[in-house]
Amino acid sequence: MGMFDSVYVPCPNCGEEKEFQSKSGDCFLDEFTLEDCPDDVFSNINRHSPHKCSCGIFFEVDEKSRVPIEVSGIKN
């Protein structure tokens, strides 16, 4: 099993938090919010994106603004 860090990102539609995993940085199984995530961990935040929320939308993080955004054009 590989090591990673987790970043919890709120869905831009309903606010439910989803776990995004990053393999950059120290990878000590640390947990962060989007706001307190170190830059080195953040650089790999979209590695498994987009994420599907239970409300039905798919989303990822805009890396320039650090804001979760809905991804359009994906069918459920």
Image (cartoon, helix red, strand yellow):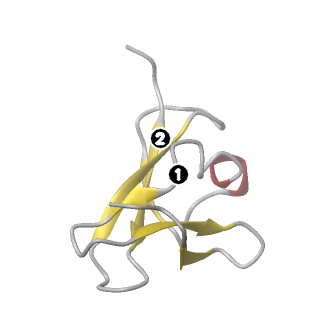
* Dot 1 or dot 2, earlier in sequence: 2
User: How packed is label 1: few (under 14 Cα within 10 Å), some, or many (20 or more)?
Assistant: some
Percent across and percent down for residue 76 are 32, 60
| Residue 18 falls in image quadrant | bottom left
Percent across and percent down for residue 7 are 45, 56
Please say if 41 is above or below 73.
above
Percent across and percent down for residue 14 are 29, 85
Percent across and percent down for residue 52 are 35, 60
Which residue is tagged 2? 5
| Residue 35 falls in image quadrant | bottom right
Q: Name the residue rendered at 54%, 68% in the picture.
A: 73
| Residue 75 falls in image quadrant | bottom left
Q: Residue furthest right?
A: 64
User: How packed is label 2: few (under 14 Cα within 10 Å), some, or many (20 or more)?
Assistant: many
Which residue is tagged 1? 49
Q: Secondary structure at mark 2?
A: strand
Q: In the image, what residue type sits under mark 1? A: Ser
Q: Name the residue rendered at 37%, 72% in the picture.
A: 57
Q: Secondary structure at mark 1?
A: loop
Please say if 18 is above or below 56.
above
Tell me the CA gap for discs 1 and 2. 15 Å
Q: Nearer the viewer, residue 41 or 49?
A: 49
Mark in front: 1 vs 2: 1
Q: In the image, what residue type sits under mark 2? A: Asp
